[in-house]
Image (tube, helix red, strand yellow):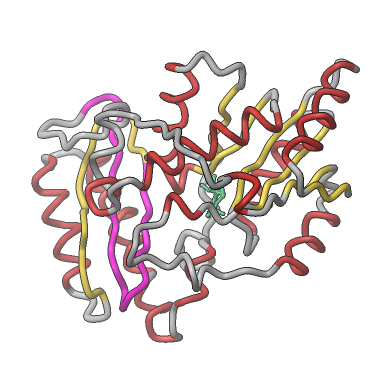
């Protein structure tokens, strides 16, 4: 595996591969890799000649009171995992090469960025869209792989790629879960033993909601109440930021079920913020 830290060298390397007619699959990550990340890498391996993984904890997508400083980092462990997956290139730039002193260009994706997580994390999706655009310009991937776990992120990135005529295919991969259903996340490492057990209520609330919707005879308000009731019944949940039924394209709350419905939850357990979602289709 080739380790590249300098954007200019990454760009030159990609140009060489592309000039030989090779396809490049990019998996952008913030490291502390788990099976969720590895599932994206496996998919990228199966569909491309060259697989590049980026590890970059992107400071501009973290709010002032968020966990940038304590975000889990495990470079050695990550490199072992990437080698055993047969990854070709690890791109791990330093913050100062991505955001030099005079950096001043930010992408704003209207509407999609303001709802759900965006309402609680102002500026977050601008930070995401900006860094992903930069990674696309540096790596020039044929395809880029993202997890459904961060559904709103996939919507924002698809919109950015389409609006800015980016020459890349966005591939969304299913959410990998622990045995009790909890969506894998680097942030699960913050949870105490008790909090970890409590966290499975998120999946249970989504799963039972999905079953209720499919069985019929419920409306969106019933589902929202069902989710909030389940979350309220778990004492270790310190805050429910949102839980409800949303349009899978526009991401706004809906009053009637559509063909494709997003059910999504964001909660805090102690100080750890966790999100999850499911698509319910008719
Ligand atoms: P992160 O390192 O958290 O920024 O995640 C990097 C990529 O991995 C994003 O596209 C995430 O959506 C994806 N990802 C994170 N957790 C999971 C999961 N449990 N299953 C599938 N993909 C995931």
Q: Is residue 70 above or below residue 44?
A: below
Residue 1: x and y, percent? 88, 49
Is 251 positioned to the left or the right of 130 in the image? left
Q: Which residues are magenta?
A: 258-278
Residue 203: x and y, percent? 37, 60
Kindly identify the residue that appears in the image at 82 percent across and 29 percent down.
12
Kindly identify the residue that appears in the image at 13 percent across and 41 percent down.
220
Q: Which quadrant of the figure has residue 21?
A: top right
Q: Is residue 276 above or below residue 201?
A: above
Residue 13: x and y, percent? 84, 32
> Can residue 267 be found in the magenta stretch?
yes
Is 57 positioned to the left or the right of 162 in the image? right
- The furthest residue to the bottom: 193
Q: Which quadrant of the figure has residue 25?
A: top right
> Can residue 187 be found in the magenta stretch?
no
Quadrant of the snapshot with the C terminus: top left
Residue 242: x and y, percent? 21, 54
Residue 139 makes an appearance in the image: yes
Q: Main secondary structure of the magenta part?
A: strand
Q: Considering depth in this image, is 156 or 61 the residue closer to the camera?
A: 61
Q: Considering depth in this image, is 273 or 11 the residue closer to the camera?
A: 11
Kindly identify the residue that appears in the image at 54 percent across and 36 percent down.
132
């Amino acid at each position: 595996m080739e380790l590249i830290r300098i954007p200019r060298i990454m760009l030159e390397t990609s140009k060489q591969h592309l000039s030989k007619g090779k396809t490049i699959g990019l998996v952008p990550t913030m490291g502390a890799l788990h099976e969720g990340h590895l599932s994206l890498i496996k998919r990228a391996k199966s569909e491309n000649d060259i697989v590049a993984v980026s590890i970059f904890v992107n400071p501009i997508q973290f709010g002032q009171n968020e966990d940038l400083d304590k975000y889990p980092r495990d470079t050695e462990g990550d490199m072992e995992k990437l080698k055993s997956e047969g990854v070709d290139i690890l791109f791990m730039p330093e913050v100062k090469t991505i955001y030099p002193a005079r950096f001043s260009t930010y992408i704003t994706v209207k509407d999609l960025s303001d709802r759900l997580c965006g309402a609680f994390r102002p500026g977050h999706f601008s930070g995401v869209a900006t860094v992903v655009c930069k990674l696309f310009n540096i790596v020039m991937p044929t395809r880029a792989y993202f997890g459904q776990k961060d559904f709103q992120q996939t919507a924002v990135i698809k919109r950015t790629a389409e609006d800015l005529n980016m020459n890349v295919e966005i591939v969304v991969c299913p959410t990998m879960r622990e045995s009790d259903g909890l969506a894998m996340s680097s942030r699960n490492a913050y949870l105490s033993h008790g909090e970890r057990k409590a966290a499975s209520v998120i999946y249970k609330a989504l799963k039972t909601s999905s079953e209720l919707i499919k069985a019929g005879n419920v409306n969106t308000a019933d589902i929202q109440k069902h989710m909030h009731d389940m979350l309220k019944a778990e004492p270790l949940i310190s805050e429910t930021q949102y839980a409800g039924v949303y349009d899978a394209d526009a991401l706004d709350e809906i009053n009637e079920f559509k063909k494709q419905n997003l059910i999504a939850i964001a909660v805090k357990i102690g100080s750890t913020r966790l999100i999850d979602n499911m698509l319910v289709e008719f």
